[in-house]
Image: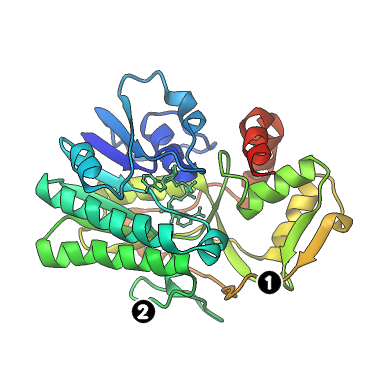
Amino acid sequence: MRILVTGGAGFIGSEYVRTLLGVPGGSAAGVPAVEPAQVTVLDALTYSGNLANLAPVADDPRLRFVQGDIRHPEVVDEAVAGHDVVVHFAAESHVDRSIAGAAPFVTTNVLGTQNLLDAALRHGVARFVHVSTDEVYGSIADGSWTEDWPLAPNSPYSASKAGSDLLALAYHRTHGLDVVVTRCSNNYGPYQYPEKVVPLFVTNLLDGHPVPLYGDGGNVRDWLHVHDHCRGIALVQHKGRAGEVYHIGGGTELTNKELTARLLDACDAGWDRVTPVADRKGHDRRYSLDITKISNELGYAPSITLDTGLADTVRWYRDNRAWWEPLKAANA
Ligand SMILES: NC(=O)c1ccc[n+]([C@@H]2O[C@H](COP(=O)([O-])OP(=O)(O)OC[C@H]3O[C@@H](n4cnc5c(N)ncnc54)[C@H](O)[C@@H]3O)[C@@H](O)[C@H]2O)c1
């Protein structure tokens, strides 16, 4: 099986590639055998793409890297040709950046996905896995979203992801392309670009700097270790039903304040290091995914507890300064 992984030099995509090639960045086993003969990574290497994320598998003869932008149809066409499966991670992924400027979110997330879907159709790709997010649903006060919940995204990021998610499903319904969509909760783990809350807080705390806490700190997110996310995607790639959406969650909901308390604890720091900042514009209050479908149909269950996962993650950032220091220096 030849698999094209878009965005495979990013945080989650690179974990997926390491997992496919048998070098998981996380600590858990239990990934279904997908056994690729070839894994091609198509990645533009934007600010969040980093070849160092693929260093553990760089010498694997099954890995091929193509630097290319999914916004360019001819690049996409060439990259998709000859592949059986496309697993599509490439995206602009940071909500705050989408508030500062939405254009690359629309061109990469929506138009880039359309380019990939068209190329997948042209080249007879047998399975297209579209990696989406719980943010497409908006915000939920009580209870949890099921896969048939109406989409009501609130940020330019989530609106662009909802556009690409619906396009992928439309290519299944209209053209019969074998599409499966995953919507997952907030990921954390090694190799995450240090603008997202967990690596930002951990690296700031390790450096003795303050951490910024949005608003009243009461926004609730479900936390999922990146390795569990990739196990879920592998299950969906392997045996998800075409045209279906599957939630992948961690089953651990925390307010940002609770998450901050755990990170302070793990880094031996106190609340004096926390600086309250104005809330993010349009900040969704709570996300919550019902994962009954993927659990019942595909046997998915998160395997890494938040305590273990956060402790491992903090240790990874502590031990891998050479990975993140240049990234933070470039942004200083
Ligand atoms: N991080 C999360 O918590 C989370 C949660 C739910 C869903 N997701 C989704 O998972 C996917 C991966 O997220 P991530 O956190 O790994 O993001 P990331 O920002 O770490 O990685 C994105 C990758 O895509 C590449 N890329 C960006 N624009 C591109 C373009 N035009 N052409 C080719 N490559 C391009 C980047 O270079 C980078 O390697 C995204 O689709 C995101 O929406 C992420």
Residue shown at the point (39%, 73%) measured from the top left? 146
Label 2 beta carbon within 8 A of ligand 1: no
Image quadrant occupied by the N terminus: top left
The spot of residue 230 in percent (x, y) is 42, 45
Label 1 to label 2: alpha-carbon separation: 26 Å
Q: Is residue 124 shown left or right of residue 160?
A: left
Q: Residue furthest bottom?
A: 141
Q: Quick one: label 1 or label 2, which is nearer the N terminus?
A: 2
Q: Name the image quarter holding residue 219.
A: bottom right
Residue 273 visible in rendering: yes
Q: Is residue 206 shown left or right of residue 21?
A: right
The spot of residue 124 in percent (x, y) is 10, 46
Residue hosting label 2:
150
Q: Name the image quarter holding residue 75.
A: top left
Residue shown at the point (56%, 81%) measured from the top left? 141
Q: Name the image quarter holding residue 110.
A: bottom left
Q: Give the foreground label among 1 and 2.
A: 1
**Which is nearer the eye, 51 or 330?**
330
Disc 2 residue type? Answer: Pro
Disc 1 residue type? Answer: Asp
Circle count? 2
Residue shown at the point (72%, 71%) measured from the top left? 278
Residue hosting label 1:
279
Residue shown at the point (46%, 64%) measured from the top left? 102
